[in-house]
Image (cartoon, helix red, strand yellow):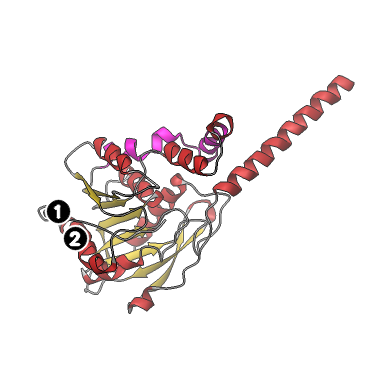
Amino acid sequence: MSAALYVLSGAGLAAIGYLVFRHLVRRGLAPTRICERRSPADLGLNYQVARIATERGKTLFGWFVPAAVAGRAPAVIVLHGWGGNAETLLPLLNPLHAAGFAVLLFDARCHGQSDADDFTSLPRFAEDCHHAMNWLQSQPMVDPSRVALIGHSVGAAAALLVSARRDDVSALVCVAAFAHPAAMMRRYLGAMRIPYFPLGWLVLRYVQRAIGHRFDAIAPVAVIGKVRCPTLLVHGAEDATVPVAEARAIFAGRSGDHVRLKVVAGSHDDFGDENDIAGEIAELVAFLQERCDDLPEPPLSSLQVVGSC
């Protein structure tokens, strides 16, 4: 009897230890929720609040800004990175709108004003982007055959994953994408002074189990070879969060000349001063505009964009 009690108590302690470990990992990796303080109205644009159904019965919050032109217009989805929200890439909105695009900016689950979930992840960002694209294509003011994606950081990795799984993405712009989730997480754990062996190793194994995907299968460096739409990879040369070598690694995995890499001055979140932003974003918009219009590829000179987190 005492031996049986010893085994049961040991199993109970192990179960409790696992629950504590899971709680600490999820709390430690959870993004800080920051709600928007500005909206498209602050830029002088009319917009609609979008409520978009996603996985697990959750709802996403977003802003839909119809195009200024009549009829079905090309459209762009803009997806923030970890800890960001729809406001993060708001500087892109006016230039895209002026170029004739309808624009959807939305919050991924556990971000901004979207619903919470038990956790968020790269695959869940991609799920949210997938549902956002379906919602956007159903709008009567949008041409469903001309929808492009812009993503930053994990949003860029998610947009890559969506583009690899769908054949109806017209064009893709990835800003500051990381090459592999494991490398990104190891940098994060290192910054937290968490040793890789054994604790960091256990965290990575747990995360893969929790999200239901092996990192190798969803890593941008592996996914890029399956993307067929015109793609522009943009990366800051001074990016300390995601080294520019990772952008080059993604580019090396491409399967054709439809993918381009542009290394620019700037860090992970900051790309040039305010005096240069208008011209830099104009080039990004031209990349999307000409591809959505199915015109010959324009030459690329300097290109910089604004992103955060």
Q: In the rendered structure, which segment of residues is drawn in magenta?
A: 202-227
Q: Residue at x 27, y 46 (%)?
A: 167
- From the top left corner, tell me how far across and down residue 261 is, in percent: 22, 46
Q: Is residue 271 above or below residue 233?
A: below
Q: Which mark is residue 104?
A: none
Q: Disc 1 designates what residue?
A: 300
Judged left or right of residue 107, residue 33 is right
Q: Disc 2 designates what residue?
A: 283
Q: Is residue 17 above or below residue 274?
A: above
- Whether 214 is among the magenta residues is yes
- Whether 107 is among the magenta residues is no
Helix, strand, or loop for circle 1? loop
Which residue is situated farthest in the bottom direction here?
44
- From the top left corner, tell me how far across and down residue 25 is, in percent: 59, 43
Occupied quadrant, residue 76: bottom left
- From the top left corner, tell me how far across and down residue 120 is, in percent: 51, 49
Residue 1 visible? no
